[in-house]
Image: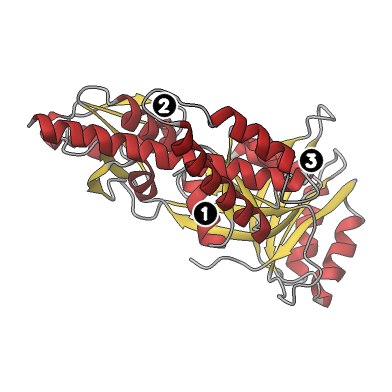
Amino acid sequence: MELNELRKKIDGVDTEIIKLLNKRMEFAVQTRKLKKQTTDQTREAEVMAKVGKPKGLLSGQFLEKIYKDIMTESKRLQEQDTKLAGFQGEHGAYSEVAVKTYNQLLIPIPCTQFSEVFEGVENNKLDFGVVPVENSLGGAVTAVNDLLVETDLTIVGEVKVPIHHCLLAPPDTDYRDIKVVYSHPQALAQCRGFLARNKLEPRQYYDTAGAAMMVSNDKPAAAAAIASKLCAEIYGLDILKENIEDHESNTTRFVVLAKEKDENSKEKGDKCSIVFSTAHKAGALFEVLEAFSDAGINLTRIESRPITKDPGKFGFLLDFQGSDQDGKVTDALDKVKKHTTMLKMLGCYKEAKE
């Protein structure tokens, strides 16, 4: 038993080493956008000087060998010039699932706040940002919609991700011993029936993936987390139960942001997003909607959000089916301009299929 316990501890350390190596590589690929060339001999010498000395049981020779391999791999990743996609949350968040669903080749970069995702794309530190705009059960993600109203970024795509929650716990946890479950308040609410049936106490945490990471690292007694299946893989947790959400139809829609549309892309969009404001008078919004109705254009979403830079005024986010290259769409938008005080095309992109 003592040998098995030691081996479990070694497995846990190995999981941490892999997570930290991944984090180091993420930082490395981000630095590529801030320097002129991949190889920086001065920086490499600084790193080797720091790590090339004995530390505890590790000899300087051993550490030098490891770090030479690490820096070789860092340069290989930088030379690939892979595109970076920012998302809000910890690794394993459903937003990261959306990134990989949109494009498997993108490198997901975690951001603390939604605003950090927008700023990263605006400042060219990120190539894309992937953010949730609405959930089929929870409705609009107001923090993101507020940012969309005032952004100059372009929506270049969308992703719809089915949200399937899992009950996760450290390896070899006995399901019968679990008393407490940590997760984001929305995830806990979406699994209310499961928690009640199993007499599990819900405890709020800032993020689903953050809860999984905490349970993996701290291993609180009699505790589990509700998060994605991806979190089990990343944090070395066992999946005790899958699909524990109360409603199977739980889906989140994400939009993909870029600094500007790729003009070389031959793909024709079939869905558009705009933001507009109207004069504060009766019938102003109706006149805008009537222009789309007369053109036979199907609206898929309309959302009203306050304009923070102009207190007392509101912007309307509107999505509709159609291409900005179609005559009936351009004609409708020309009519809309006459009834708005501000009109901005956020993007035309391929609609995600269910």
- SS assignment at label 2: loop
Residue toward you, 238 or 278: 238
Q: Position of residue 164 (x, y in %)?
A: 36, 51
- SS assignment at label 3: helix
From the image, tell me which residue sits under label 1.
Answer: 98
The answer to whether residue 190 is visible is no
Is label 3 in contact with label 2 (beta carbons under 8 Å)? no
Report which quarter residue 167 is drawn in: top left
Residue toward you, 192 or 26: 26
Q: Residues within 10 Å of mark 3 (few under 14, many from 20)?
A: some
Q: Residues within 10 Å of mark 2 (few under 14, many from 20)?
A: some
Q: Residues within 10 Å of mark 1 (few under 14, many from 20)?
A: many
From the image, tell me which residue sits under label 2.
Answer: 205
Judged left or right of residue 223, residue 317 is: right
Q: Is residue 121 above or below residue 157?
A: above
Which mark's residue is nearer the viewer, 3 or 2? 2
Q: CA distance from mark 3 to mark 2?
A: 29 Å
- SS assignment at label 1: helix
Q: CA distance from mark 1 to mark 3?
A: 23 Å
Looking at the image, tell me whether mark 3 or mark 2 is earlier in sequence order: 3
Numbered badge on residue 317: none
Which residue type carries mark 1?
Ala
Is label 2 in contact with label 1 (beta carbons under 8 Å)? no
From the image, tell me which residue sits under label 3.
Answer: 150
Which residue type carries mark 2?
Tyr
